[in-house]
Amino acid sequence: MISHESHDQYVSSEDGTRLVIRRVGSGDPVVLVHGSGGGLRSWAAVADQLAHDHEVWMPARRGYGPSDVPPGRKSFKDESADLAAVIEAARESSGGPVHLVGASYGATLSLHTVSTDPRHVRSLALFEPPLFAAGPETVPMLDRYRSAFDRDDAQEMAAALNDVTRVPAKIVAAFAAAAGDRTPDPVEARRSAIGWLHDLEALAEDSTDVARWSSITVPTLLMQGADTWEPMPTTMNALATTIPGARRIIWQGQSHFVTMTAPTLVADALRQFFAEVPA
């Protein structure tokens, strides 16, 4: 793999929130939006391959350092404004509309953003948005997580998040076994914990109504792993029938972590999709 030189820069959202963006490569612009617990490096392995022929923009979302962590509760309206500012910066840099790609929570945010203002989005690619994890049912999990966060109880925070994401116990156990005695970097762990708290706030105020995305008309690619647990498969089925003309890829032997476990698979699928989208 060829490592491309990256550059970090700042973009200000309409409310003054400062977002840090990592940019790499040259060509048609691609904005990659990370999921919960992520950051500037979440898409690095995929971005390094796309950078051969695309200018890739990777923002750290609000609530995730080194971007700002504004006070108060977060909403998808806030983050849609953030993402619109990033899209505008990428458009101004390149002179053309962007390919918008979101993973997990970042895919849900991308749906919100495109449904609000699709003008500068050339295409939309979504990997497993957790549309089932929203609304009043998530409020007790948010409260439980916030309480554990205030106590700095990492084990209870993780347990609350497992209830939100519905990761099967055997997968949780496998991750724990793989980690062994390694302890996470405390700065990165705290940064992730803060970001998760704000993401849960936005999810608690959101809706599980998939039908609202039927207004999206930009070319759309839906991506998923065949091994991802329910209710993600059911959610993706519903989304596929809701967005008119959406294309769909289901990767055998992959799950919700495919951007890390098989980045070449993801990069190749995105590059092919981008090439087929009308200019």
Image: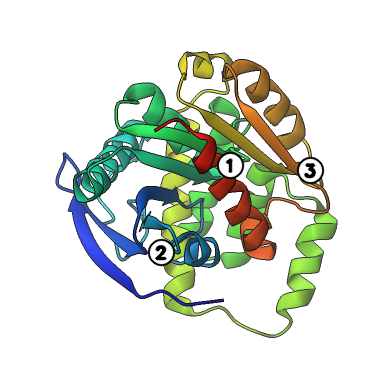
Which one is in front, 95 or 82? Answer: 95
Which one is in front, 205 or 100? Answer: 100
Neighbourhood count class around disc 1 (C-alpha, 10 Å): few under 14, some 14–19, many 20 upward = many
Give amino acid for label 2: Leu
Residue 172 in which image quadrant: bottom right
Give amino acid for label 3: Trp
In x, y percent, where is residue 277? Answer: 49, 33
Mark 1 or mark 3: name the one nearer the start of the chain. 1
Per the image, label 2 sits on a secondary structure element best described as: loop
100 lies left or right of 248: left
46 lies left or right of 24: right
Which residue corresponds to mark 2?
A: 40
Judge depth for marks 1 and 2 and give the one in front.
Answer: 2
Q: Residue at x 25, y 48 (%)?
A: 94
Q: Residue at x 31, y 37 (%)?
A: 97
Work out which residue is located at the far bottom of the displayed protein and give it. 181
| Scheme of image coloration | rainbow
Which residue corresponds to mark 1?
A: 141
30 lies left or right of 21: right
Which residue corresponds to mark 3?
A: 229
Mark 3 or mark 2: name the one nearer the start of the chain. 2
Neighbourhood count class around disc 2 (C-alpha, 10 Å): few under 14, some 14–19, many 20 upward = many
Give amino acid for label 1: Met
